[in-house]
Image (spheres, rainbow, N blue to C red):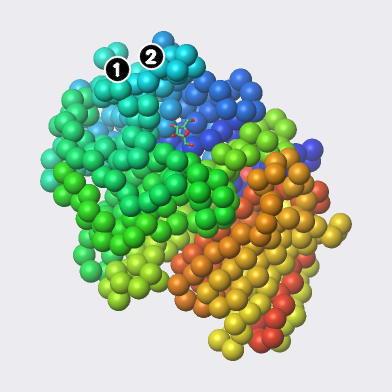
Amino acid sequence: MQAFNDPFRPAFHFTPEAHWMNDPNGLVFSGGLYHLFYQYFPGDVVWGPMHWGHATSVDLVSWRHHPVAFFPDEKGWIFSGSAVVDATGSAGFGSGSLVAVFTLHDGEARKRGALGVENQGLGFSRDGGATWEKYAGNPVLRNSGESDFRDPKVFPSPTGSGWNLILAAGDRIKIYSSDDLRDWRHESDFFPDAEGFGVWECPDLFPMNAGTGLAWVMLLSQTTAAPNGGSGTRYLVGDFDGHAFTARAPLQWIDWGKDYYAAVTYSNTVGDKRIIVGWMSNWQYAAKTPTRSWRGAMALPRELSLDLSGEPSLESWRLKQTPVRGFEDLPRSEIARISGPMPVTAEFPPAGYADITLAVTDACDSFSVELSNAVGERFTVQCEGCAARVDRRRSGIVDFSADYATSSQTMEAALPIRSVRLIVDACSVEIFFNEGSSTMTNLVFPSRPFSSVTASGSGLAELIVTIPKIPE
Ligand code: FRU
């Protein structure tokens, strides 16, 4: 919850109680709980020797903090990775155990310039995720000299038996298979067709029911050259047979804002649900954002859907993202519902959070939505046909990094923009265009909470502002 003296602490986004956080790790659903682990440095509010912090939730909206699950040791710092439920006990830790797979990063050797310092290790829990141990035989997957070799994602193999693991190794994604999560066979390398990406990080690979049968989606994070600068997350739609991945369409951006990185999905969810969590920051300035005792927040968990039944135009082949049910089902108070010709304005309580939807009629091809506060700071979304521009240059505290708000940001939707939803929560604005067909996630640091929204343009609009009731 927001604290009186901590204006940037979100109400319904996950943040660490204190200190530094980056990537989401080990996302697994088990025993009715969503486990969220995260890259954590309990010694400072900047990045350092990495631990896995731990929290759980029943609804992905309110979270319980737990003790650190994995501490660094002589084999390395605990970098990003994933977790699965090992129903049959294939790894030897007992049936139904939870198994985490992470990168052991030898930070001291890396400081001396050594290569090959990243290897993969296992951890496990025999009590549903309450307590964790590292496997004594770590590492289980050794590096043969690559400078980057990290962020393993493990999932059941589509061959019907055993497991697959993918990880990022510089310019490629390496694919492995195993029967027991310990002994890994190299299957193939996949080279995403891109330039200027720096290195790949935090890959994910999962099947989705796409209307025409199964498609496989590969998520990839790239360290540089995101559409609006710095680090960003992309995806590919393709096929996977347990041995090799082939792409059916070009790489796309999963989120065009500046602050959506290292996004990965939950394993073992019920039914076809695919839930993604991204870290709301950008490596350009992650260590400089103006929060005090804590630093780093996760985006709202989102449910993904994909429909390939139409033409392979970009619109129908785009992943759609909507906030998870737990957020949509929160009780709300409706503050405003205004229909009519623009401009329309609604005021809302300066609590720091609000959920705002603007829908325009077909006749309106050019319009803007602007959030503002009592001291004239503003955050603007300008839409023109399929294009959007987001401007946070006058949104409050912006001078902590030259990369934070140098120019306005751009986004290209596949179809003309007809609706814009802004989910505002203390230090972030997540924008869902056309019901989640495109998204832009941004940090903001207004010196007073936003308390007004204005939609401008020529045409008819409906503006709805609700305030979610935050669970205790
Ligand atoms: C991505 C990343 C990962 C790495 C982790 C270290 O943000 O660089 O590649 O495992 O962060 O904290």
Quarter occupied by residue 170: top left
Residue 329 is at least partly visible in this image: no
Measured from the top left, where is residue 135 in percent x and y? 30, 18
Mark 1: amino acid: Asn
Measured from the top left, where is residue 367 in percent x and y? 66, 77
Q: Is residue 214 left or right of residue 466?
A: left
* Residue identified by numbered label 2: 75
Residue visible at 67% across and 47% down? 404
Other-residue count near label 1 (Cα within 10 Å), few / some / many at <14 / 14–19 / ≥20 = some
Residue visible at 26% across and 61% down? 248
* Camera-nearest residue between 68 and 150: 150
* Camera-nearest residue between 87 and 363: 363
* Residue identified by numbered label 1: 138
Asked if the residue under mark 1 is in contact with the one under mark 2, i.e. CB atoms within 8 Å, the reply is: yes
Q: CA distance from mark 2 to mark 1?
A: 8 Å
Q: Is residue 90 left or right of residue 438?
A: left
Q: Quadrant of the C terminus?
A: top right
Q: Residue furthest bottom?
A: 363
